[in-house]
Image (cartoon, rainbow, N blue to C red):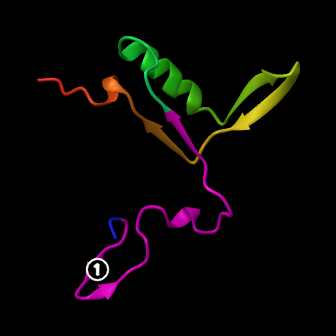
């Protein structure tokens, strides 16, 4: 309901995530508690925003695609500055 809007009693299609409706799957990345301060959070978020990440698993290289959505959690994501 939060992603749809009703005007004059008529329901419209999803407004925000309609471009994912044709996909068979939906992947998201989640990062939290990456270290002290905003610089380390920025560095990890920037890495996760790349189209793909290459890593090693059992002495062979694996390419992981970027998720469709990046969720940022942890105490630094919830800090309110005044």
Left-right relation of 34 to 10: right
Q: Residue at x 45, y 39 (%)?
A: 71
Furthest residue to the left? 82
Which image quarter holds the C terminus? top left
Depth check, front residue: 31 or 16:
31
Left-right relation of 81 to 19: left
**Horizontal and vertical percent for residue 21?**
58, 68
Q: Residues within 10 Å of mark 1 (few under 14, many from 20)?
A: few
Q: Secondary structure at mark 1?
A: strand
Q: In the rendered image of this protein, does residue 12 appear above or below residue 21?
A: below
Q: Quadrant of residue 28?
A: top right
Question: What is the magenta segment's predominant secondary structure?
Answer: loop
Depth check, front residue: 32 or 42:
32
Q: In the rendered image of this protein, does residue 22 appear above or below residue 66?
A: below
Q: Quadrant of residue 33?
A: top left
Q: Residue at x 32, y 23 (%)?
A: 76
Q: Residue at x 36, y 72 (%)?
A: 4
Q: In the rendered image of this protein, does residue 19 appear above or below residue 64?
A: below
Does residue 55 belong to the magenta stretch?
Answer: no
Does residue 29 belong to the magenta stretch?
Answer: yes
**Horizontal and vertical percent for residue 44?**
52, 22
**Horizontal and vertical percent for residue 63?**
77, 33
Q: To which residue does mark 1 refer?
A: 6
**Horizontal and vertical percent for residue 55?**
75, 23
Furthest residue to the top? 36
Residue span colored magenta? 3-30
Q: Residue at x 81, y 24 (%)?
A: 57
Which image quarter holds the N terminus? bottom left
Left-right relation of 16 to 77: right
Q: In the rendered image of this protein, does residue 37 appear above or below residue 61?
A: above
């Amino acid at each position: 309901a939060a992603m749809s809007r009703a005007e004059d009693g008529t329901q419209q299609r999803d407004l925000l995530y309609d471009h994912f409706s044709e996909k068979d799957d939906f992947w998201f990345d989640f990062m939290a508690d990456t270290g002290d301060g905003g610089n380390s959070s920025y560095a990890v978020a920037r890495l996760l925003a790349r189209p793909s990440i290459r890593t090693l698993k059992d002495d062979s290289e694996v390419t992981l695609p970027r998720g469709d959505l990046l969720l940022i959690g942890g105490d630094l994501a919830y800090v309110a500055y005044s």
